[in-house]
């Protein structure tokens, strides 16, 4: 999801904010819009409006049935819904893999500099700092230039911090557990 939407969002967000401030702004927006709202579309729209963000259109990617998106001077917020689906396995057999319904909230922060990892590790979630993330396993396939850390939360949510150093682009996302 990161690479497919990065260019659309970076074009949509262009600003003169200090790069180090963008990390803090992005993490604050992620906490408010994604971790506190937890995927409620109406509450996300209200939170985005409260942050001075405006709605903008992004076409849903294949497999997604809707995307709500909001942008401001230095960041964008997206909420994606992906219905449950089946996909064939890679061994060309007639067996298919069931992919559960997903709801994903993401904050895109272009033109970032500074230690995004330390800033995200300090984010308070459920009353405690998020702490050190883990590197993705073999089930994640991204180009080498994409740095990723993952945090699994007690409620089944999974946070991803993804950074492309060459583009100075940071995406913070949370996949909510089934049933949201």
Image (cartoon, grey):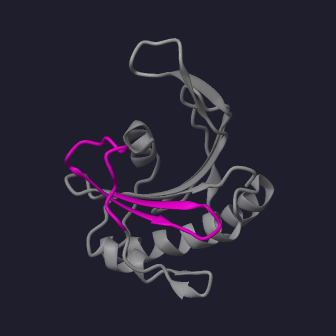
Q: Residue 112 appears at what percent x and percent y?
A: 31, 65
Q: Residue at x 66, y 62 (%)?
A: 48
The residue range painted magenta reads 134-162
Q: Residue at x 31, y 41 (%)?
A: 141
Q: Can residue 52 be spotted in the picture?
A: no
* Picture mark count: 0
Q: Quadrant of the N terminus?
A: top left
145 to 160, vertically: above or below: above
Left or right of 66? Residue 17 is left
Looking at the image, which is closer to me, 102 or 106?
Answer: 102
50 to 167, vertically: above or below: below
Q: Residue at x 62, y 81 (%)?
A: 126
Q: Residue 135 appears at what percent x and percent y?
A: 31, 61
Q: Residue 147 appears at what percent x and percent y?
A: 27, 57
Looking at the image, which is closer to me, 59 or 96?
Answer: 96
Q: Residue furthest right?
A: 42
Q: Is residue 141 magenta?
A: yes
Q: Quadrant of the C terminus?
A: bottom right
Q: Is residue 64 magenta?
A: no
90 to 98, vertically: above or below: above
Q: Residue at x 63, y 72 (%)?
A: 32
Left or right of 37? Residue 164 is left
Q: Can residue 60 be spotted in the picture?
A: yes
Q: Quadrant of residue 124?
A: bottom right
Q: Residue 151 appears at what percent x and percent y?
A: 46, 66
């Amino acid at each position: 999801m990161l690479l497919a939407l990065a260019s659309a969002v970076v074009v949509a967000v262009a600003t003169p904010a200090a790069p180090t401030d963008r990390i803090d702004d992005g993490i604050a927006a992620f906490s408010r819009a994604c971790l506190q709202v937890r995927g409620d579309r109406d509450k996300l729209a209200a939170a985005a409006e409260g942050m001075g963000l405006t709605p903008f259109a992004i076409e849903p990617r294949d497999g997604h049935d809707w995307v709500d998106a909001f942008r401001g001077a230095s960041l964008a917020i997206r909420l994606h819904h992906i219905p449950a689906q089946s996909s064939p396995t890679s061994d060309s057999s007639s067996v298919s893999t069931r992919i559960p319904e997903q709801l994903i909230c993401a904050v895109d922060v272009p033109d970032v500099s500074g230690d995004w990892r330390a800033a995200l590790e300090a984010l308070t979630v459920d009353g405690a700092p998020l702490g050190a993330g883990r590197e993705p396993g073999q089930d994640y396939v991204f180009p080498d230039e994409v740095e990723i850390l993952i945090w699994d939360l007690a409620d089944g949510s999974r946070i991803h911090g993804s950074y492309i150093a060459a583009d100075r682009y940071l995406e913070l996302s949370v996949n909510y557990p089934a049933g949201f």
